[in-house]
Image (cartoon, rainbow, N blue to C red):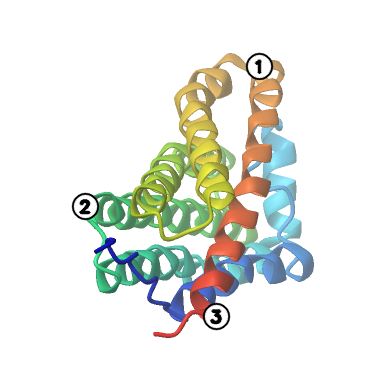
């Protein structure tokens, strides 16, 4: 008898996680948080930005602390779907851990931005504001490698299971590899100055592929019976 093909079991929380994460655009579009992290602005410009956008930075930091958790829920949903479909979940387990690391780093980065805004609003020392902002900037750019590894691991787990469309799996694999490369080079580029950093930032277009992969995965698992 021919071997029966495994059936993909859905998980609607995967799409919920994707939508929750993409709700970060509410803050980006409406909270007027300014240019955070400030990267290569001069001291006076950094202080002025945080002073004029203190409320928006604080609101955005709080909002991100909620919605960024959607990335973890998304990867947990993939792992659960693979597990209940009878597929191997080792890489999916790793994807959940790596994504959790990225979320913790990003929330911490915005928390430091909120601290810098509070210091600026209360007339704090300029050097302290710049120092806190710089720490937040470095935390923020450290998210790329964990996100890339998470996407790569989850997408390759999808590919190995043979339960998802091949194009979707390869889109995730390509996005994950690009994210890992970005994570490797963004630190040295950031330390080298605005020119190298802006060049490397071109790789951040990988997020477009990530978002498509995330939403498509969520929709597929939402439509499958659970």
Percent x, y of residue 5: 34, 64
Question: How far apart are labels 1 and 2 at the CA level?
Answer: 37 Å
Mark toward the viewer: 2 or 3: 3
Percent x, y of residue 15: 53, 74
| Near-viewer residue (69 or 65) | 69
Question: Is 141 left, or right, of 1 in this rendering?
Answer: right
Residue for badge 2 = 90
Percent x, y of residue 66: 49, 74
Question: How far apart are labels 3 and 1 at the CA level?
Answer: 44 Å
Mark 2 burial class by Cα count in 10 Å: few <14, some 14-19, many 20+: few
Question: Is 92 left, or right, of 68 in this rendering?
Answer: left
Question: How far apart are labels 2 and 3 at the CA level?
Answer: 25 Å
Give residue 223's mark: 3
Q: Is residue 62 visible?
A: no
Total number of numbered discs in the rendering: 3
Residue for badge 1 = 196
Q: Residue at x 30, y 66 (%)?
A: 4
* Secondary structure of residue under mark 1: helix
């Amino acid at each position: 008898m021919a071997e029966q093909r495994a059936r993909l079991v859905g998980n609607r929380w995967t799409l919920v996680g994707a939508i929750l994460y993409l709700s970060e655009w509410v803050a980006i579009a409406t909270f007027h948080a300014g240019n955070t992290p400030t990267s290569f602005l001069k001291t006076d410009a950094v202080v002025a930005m945080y002073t004029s956008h203190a409320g928006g930075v604080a609101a955005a930091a709080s909002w991100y602390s909620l919605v960024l958790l959607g990335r973890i829920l998304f990867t947990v949903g993939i792992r659960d779907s693979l597990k209940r479909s009878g597929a191997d979940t080792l890489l999916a387990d790793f994807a959940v851990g790596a994504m959790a690391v990225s979320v913790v780093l990003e929330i911490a980065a915005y928390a430091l931005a909120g601290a810098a805004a509070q210091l600026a609003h209360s007339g704090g020392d300029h050097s302290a504001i710049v120092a806190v902002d710089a720490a937040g900037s470095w935390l923020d750019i450290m998210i790329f490698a964990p996100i890339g590894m998470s996407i790569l691991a989850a997408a390759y787990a999808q590919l190995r299971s043979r339960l998802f469309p091949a194009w979707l799996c390869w889109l995730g694999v390509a996005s994950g590899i690009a994210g890992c490369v970005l994570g490797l080079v963004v630190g040295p580029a950031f330390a080298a100055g605005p020119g190298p950093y802006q060049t490397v930032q071109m790789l951040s277009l990988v997020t477009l592929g990530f978002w498509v992969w995330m939403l498509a995965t969520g929709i597929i698992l939402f439509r499958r019976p659970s």
